[in-house]
Structure formats: structure tokens, C-alpha cells
Amino acid sequence: MRELNDVSASSITSMHCGGKIECLLEVDSTEELLYLVSTLEEFFVLGGGTNTIFRDGRVPIPVIRLGQSFNFIKTDKDSLYVGSATPIAELLDFCTTDGLSGLEFMAGIPGKIGGALYMNAGAKDKAIMESVSTIEIIDKKGVRTIKKQDLDYCYRCGGISPKATIISAHFLLDRASPTVVKKNIATALGHRKNQPKGYSSGSIFMNPEGTSAGYLIDQVGLKGFKVGGAVVSDDHANFIINQGSATTSDIRTLISIIKKRVKDAFGIELKEEVAIVG
Ligand SMILES: Cc1cc2nc3c(=O)[nH]c(=O)nc-3n(C[C@H](O)[C@H](O)[C@H](O)COP(=O)(O)OP(=O)(O)OC[C@H]3O[C@@H](n4cnc5c(N)ncnc54)[C@H](O)[C@@H]3O)c2cc1C
């Protein structure tokens, strides 16, 4: 296990903001993880940091990150067995080479498999949990395997307790030729052509039932609206871009303004998709 102190949150998140993480623990075995999960009162598990923002100033909550031994992809009978520290892009490369279809819609979503499962990440009405058969987790009860049907997953929620750490998952995918998988991935990436560039956490809010958060934010005229170094993207109103100097406080203020303006105009309460820690 590696313990890193005073780690800049900006260096390990895609929004590139926030203060100093007092204690970042990088674990390399299930035993180490089991020890931490059973001894720490509270902790936060970080994947690729593409949907997470840490507070400004000191971040006292211990942050656990899974090391390279949780980055693996293996064929296990009819399913694919994937470690949760595996980057989504690596899994898609494997699926292309091996001719496995079902996850191509994930192309272009940054981050790691553990974060994607926790968030039930997805695009275009598809989400990762649809292709899962079981998830392996560690919590105070030990190492457990949970069947997909026992998880209460839904839109942007994998149904996994925040007290549990996902270590791996089994996926059930279809056989297809590598050419077809490659083509599907290219199509998915094509849908992202106009995705805003720059430091961000992707969509800040979940889409409310029957509409999109981006549309509502655009309608209240907030595209281009700025607080400090944080701005509502001109390309996609559900993205907040850190222009380089944004603090988490700037982003929080911007989020509050957006929520109030949308609530006042449409009576709709936007809910954050991004996790803000501390
Ligand atoms: C440019 C951009 C585009 C994006 N597009 C999309 C999109 O199209 N669709 C979409 O759904 N998302 C999108 N996202 C958001 C993000 O990439 C996804 O939610 C991704 O799956 C998060 O993975 P991560 O490893 O970075 O998670 P993190 O940000 O590290 O963590 C996210 C959450 O998962 C939890 N978590 C992480 N790992 C584990 C684990 N091993 N066990 C238990 N809990 C864990 C964390 O505690 C946190 O609550 C986008 C982000 C960016 C920056």
C-alpha cells in the first residue's frame, strides 16, 4: 500500500480544481483493501476522477485508489472478467480485438470501470449495467459477489452502496467481428464530435424525466455565464468548464445559480451527476 500526503486534487481530477487531499491510499491487493474498509470510519473511493470534484482547502477524508493489480481483463467461461481500475478505453480496445460487442456506446466516456459501474455511466439511452452479470465488492462484511438482478440500479446510479468498493465485474457480451465493433465505436465517437473541450467533469446535472438539463440551462440564458474561472459551456450548457483558475467554490456557486434559475423558470429541481467531495 502506498500512502501519499497532501496530494493536489487538481492533479487527479478532470475538472482540475480543489485543494489538498491529506491522505491518498493506493491499494494493491484485496487484503489491503479489506483492511482499510474494515478499519476506516469513512473514506472516499476514487476511480479516474472524471466525475468527481474535491472541495477547496484541505480534504480530510481518506481517499482510496485501486492500484494496477485491479487493472485486468480476463476471459472467464462465457463472460469477461474486468478489474475496476481498468480504464474504459482499455476495455473497449480489448473488445475490439477480441470481437466482443455490447459496450461500444461507452466510447469516449473517460474514467475507469469501477467509477462507470458506480455511476451506471452511459450514453444514448444505454448504460453499462445492462451488460453486467455480477459485481464483486468489498465492504465491512468482506468480499462479496452481487448479481445484477439484486442491485437497484437506475439512470446514473449503479445501486452500489457508497460504503462498498467495487473490485471487479463480469460482463456478458455478444460475439461480433472486430470490424463491426470498430465501426460501432467510431459511430459512438462521432456523436461526441461537439462535446466541449477543456477541463470538465462531463455533464454536471442528470437529465430530468422527459427533458435534458442542457436544454433547460440554455433556455434560461446561462450559456457563457461565468463565476470566477468557471463558465457554462457555449457548446453544451450542461458542461461547466474550468478555464484554468476555477476553484471548487466558483463551481459550487455556478451550480447554485443554475439550479435556482432553472427552478424559478420551470419548477424543475436539477440534481447533480458530479460527486462533490467535502
Ligand atoms: C469529457 C467528459 C465526458 C463524459 N461523458 C460521459 C457520458 O457520456 N456518460 C456518462 O455517464 N458519464 C460521462 N462522464 C462522466 C464520467 O466520465 C463517468 O461517470 C465515469 O464513468 C466516471 O468514472 P471515474 O473512474 O472517473 O469515476 P470517479 O470520478 O473517480 O468516481 C465517480 C463515482 O464513482 C465512485 N467510484 C469510483 N470507483 C469506485 C469503485 N471502485 N468502487 C466504488 N465506487 C467507486 C466514486 O466514489 C464517485 O462517487 C464524462 C466525463 C467527462 C470529463
Image (spheres, grey):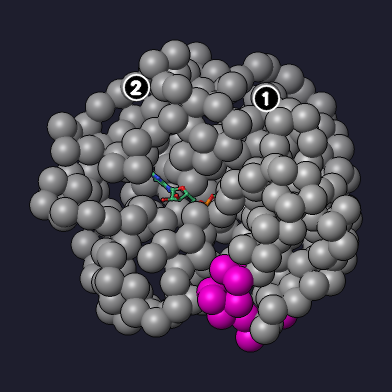
Q: Position of residue 117 (x, y in %)?
A: 50, 37
- The amino acid type found where label 2 is placed reads Ile
Going from N to C along the chain, the mark reached first, 1 or 2, is 1
SS under mark 2: strand
Separation (CA) of disc 1 from disc 2: 21 Å
Vertical position of residue 71 compared to residue 58: above or below: above
Please name the residue shown 60% across and 71% down the image. 253
Q: Is residue 248 magenta?
A: yes
Q: Which residue is mark 1?
A: 102
Please name the residue shown 45% across and 54% down the image. 47
Q: Nearer the viewer, mark 1 or mark 2?
A: 2
Q: Position of residue 85 (x, y in %)?
A: 44, 49
SS under mark 1: loop
What range of the chain is rendered magenta? 243-253
Q: Is residue 10 left or right of residue 147?
A: right
Vertical position of residue 143 compared to residue 1: above or below: above
The numbered mark at residue 146 is 2
Q: Nearer the viewer, residue 20 or 174?
A: 20
Residue 191 visible here: yes
- The amino acid type found where label 1 is placed reads Gly
Which of the image's four quarters has the C terminus? bottom left
Vertical position of residue 275 compared to residue 95: above or below: below
Q: Position of residue 109 (x, y in %)?
A: 67, 48
Please name the residue shown 65% across and 47% down the image. 270
Q: Is residue 160 left or right of residue 34?
A: right
Q: Is residue 134 magenta?
A: no
